[in-house]
Image (cartoon, rainbow, N blue to C red):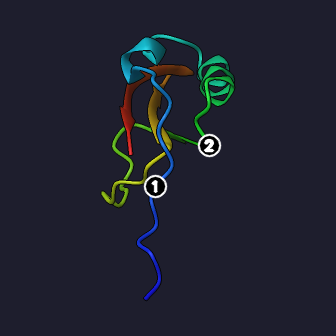
Amino acid sequence: MAPTPTPSAEPDDSPDAYVGLEADRAERLARERGWPTVRSLPPGAIITMEYRVGRLNFEVKGGRVARAWKG
């Protein structure tokens, strides 16, 4: 039987640190800090709610991050 895969660790980083930053700057910073997937979304976007280790989500309003969360 194959071993159960272990998900990669997420960066030790708080999503709250990105709120208020310009979206482009926030995405660059997140990648520098080790987030393999960064997703920018408009307000009210319809998205799936599965949790993906290593993904950081940004809700972007007026070019700035209004909300950020893992998964």
Residue beneath the point at 62% across and 43% down: 36
Q: Residues within 10 Å of mark 1 (few under 14, many from 20)?
A: few
Reading the image, the residue beneath label 1 is 7
Q: Which amino acid, by three-letter code, is at mark 2? A: Pro
Residue 65 in the image: x percent, y percent? 47, 21
| Along the line of sight, the residue nearer the viewer: 11 or 48 | 11
Choose top left, top right, bottom left or bottom right for residue 26. top right
| Along the line of sight, the residue nearer the viewer: 10 or 70 | 10
Reading the image, the residue beneath label 2 is 36
Residue beneath the point at 50% across and 30% down: 11
Q: CA distance from mark 1 to mark 2?
A: 13 Å
Q: Residue at the bottom extreme? A: 1
Choose top left, top right, bottom left or bottom right for residue 44. top left
Q: Is residue 32 placed above or below 3 in the rendered structure?
A: above
Q: Callout 2: helix, strand or loop?
A: loop
| Along the line of sight, the residue nearer the viewer: 4 or 17 | 4
